[in-house]
């Protein structure tokens, strides 16, 4: 029995030097590239498309792609779009649990410290109200 694995149709890329993330969607009649920031020059866009094709992320026909005259029947659609950046729900839940522990721990630490301060002040107040007798030794 053959199991057919479907190839992913979208890929994420990070460009830290440009502070930009990219999502490449390989659709049936076009390639959609969603960028978080407009940091790609026309030359960089062309190089990126050719790199994607050379690495097999998009069809090989894009290796000869030109922005001015497309040799491909399919087109490339560039979009500025951050809506695809959604944090993983598991990471959100884990972060909330961690923050709850930190806040509860901080509150308990504050409570212990305040108790120590208040008990220390009360003890100091008692010692002023009832001074301890002092014993003086004299040499005779």
Image (cartoon, grey):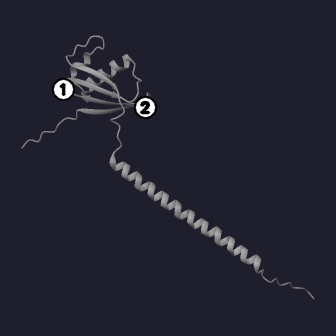
Q: Mark 2: which secondary structure? A: loop
**Above or below — where is 31 with respect to 88?**
above
The tag on residue 85 is none
Dot 1: few (<14), some (14–19), or many (≥20) neighbours within 10 Å?
few
Q: Mark 2 points at which residue?
A: 16
Left or right: 21 as drawn, with respect to 70: right
Residue 117, image x and y in percent? 65, 67
**Above or below — where is 91 with respect to 80?**
below
Left or right: 42 as drawn, with respect to 134: left
**Quick one: quadrant of the C terminus?**
bottom right
Dot 2: few (<14), some (14–19), or many (≥20) neighbours within 10 Å?
few
Q: Residue at x 77, y 82 (%)?
A: 132
Distance between the alpha carbons at the discs numbered 2 and 1 = 30 Å
Residue 38, image x and y in percent? 40, 24
- Decide which of 99, 16 is in the foreground and name it: 99
Residue 72, image x and y in percent? 21, 16
Closest to the camera, between mark 2 and mark 1, is 1
Q: Within the image, what quadrant is residue 17 found in?
A: top left
- Decide which of 7, 68 is in the foreground and name it: 68
Q: Within the image, what quadrant is residue 29 found in?
A: top left
Q: Residue at x 30, y 26 (%)?
A: 33
Q: Mark 1 points at which residue?
A: 28
**Quick one: quadrant of the N terminus?**
top left
Q: Within the image, what quadrant is residue 47 found in?
A: top left
Left or right: 59 as drawn, with respect to 14: left
């Amino acid at each position: 029995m053959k199991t057919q694995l479907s190839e992913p149709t979208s890929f994420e890329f990070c460009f830290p030097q440009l502070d930009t993330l990219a999502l490449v969607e390989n659709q049936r009649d076009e390639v959609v590239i969603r960028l978080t920031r407009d940091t790609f020059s026309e030359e960089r866009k062309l190089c990126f498309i050719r790199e994607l094709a050379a690495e097999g992320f998009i069809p090989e026909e894009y290796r000869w792609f030109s922005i001015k005259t497309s040799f491909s029947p399919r087109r490339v659609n560039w979009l500025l779009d951050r809506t695809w950046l959604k944090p993983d729900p598991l990471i959100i839940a884990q972060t909330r649990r961690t923050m709850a522990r930190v806040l509860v721990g901080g509150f308990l630490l504050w409570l212990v410290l305040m108790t120590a301060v208040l008990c220390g002040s009360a003890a100091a107040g008692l010692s002023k109200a009832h001074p301890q007798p002092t014993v003086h030794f004299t040499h005779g």
